[in-house]
Amino acid sequence: MPSNDYESANEAEISSPKLLAYRSARGAAITAISLLIPFGTVAFFIFYCINNEGYALSASVEIGNIQFIALIVHGLYFLMLPFGFELMIDKLPFPGSSEKYRFGKIPKRPDNLYWMMTHLSGELFFLGAVMLLLMASQPSVPRWVLILPIAQCAYNMKNDLLWVGFGKYLSPIRKPMSVMALDWFVIGICLVIYIVHFFTA
């Protein structure tokens, strides 16, 4: 395909008001490949533990001071989000944020899928907050439990990569969610702390 034709086809795909996975086979492939980040991360840590003595998944590991702080920050951050997704989704990322940073608007006629996704988002953030804060409350946990916040962070990093890094090309409205760079920063720091703790505790 000549360069101009390819660019035109690419432009049409990018500017389509559809979610990436439903635009084309290429969009579906990009979405599927991005899932390798969280799935691959979890697989790596599980197989590392299985194949290395001293890293038994059932072994007890202390929650250190820095890990404790990261879990509290991460957990409190997530504890606020169910209210955001269930009660004020049109105000996200936070009430009072400038219009240019808002994630979007509620459709005039939201259907059950949209309604369902707001509830499921709230549910999963609630679950994440409970997990993180309960971990922080314990002096030690089985090593496999340490993989849970790493798994969340890996999925979070995948999302932020698409939303911020490639949002201009992959977003349904061709607009990156630049405010999520803050999320990328906070969760990225937590991820580094979790990984260092995993290998040094």
Image (spheres, grey):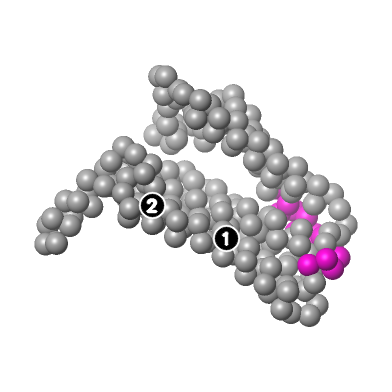
Residue 100 circle label = none
Q: Is residue 106 left or right of residue 57?
A: left
Which is nearer the eye, 76 or 120?
Answer: 120
What residue lies at 17% left-to-right and 57% top-to-bottom? 6
Q: Which amino acid does label 1 sit on?
A: Phe
Q: Mark 2 packing: few (<14 Cα in 10 Å), some, or many (20+)? A: some
Picture coordinates of residue 82, whole percent (x, y): 64, 33
What residue lies at 78% left-to-right and 67% top-to-bottom? 57
Which is nearer the eye, 155 or 133?
Answer: 155
What residue lies at 69% left-to-right and 38% top-to-bottom? 126
What residue lies at 65% left-to-right and 59% top-to-bottom? 150
**Mark 1 or 2, nearer chain start:** 2
Picture coordinates of residue 94, whole percent (x, y): 54, 33
Residues at marks 1 and 2 touching, judged by CB atoms closer than 8 Å? no
Q: What residue type is labelled 2?
A: Ala
Q: Is residue 59 left or right of residue 120?
A: right
In magenta, the rendered stretch is 57-73
Residue 1 vertical placement versus 135 (above, below): below
Please indicate, yes or no, whether residue 188 appears anywhere in the rendered image.
no
Q: In which quarter of the image is the N terminus?
A: bottom left
How much space separates mark 1 and mark 2, taking CA atoms? 17 Å
Q: In this view, does 141 lie to the left or right of 170?
A: right
Residue 28 circle label = 2
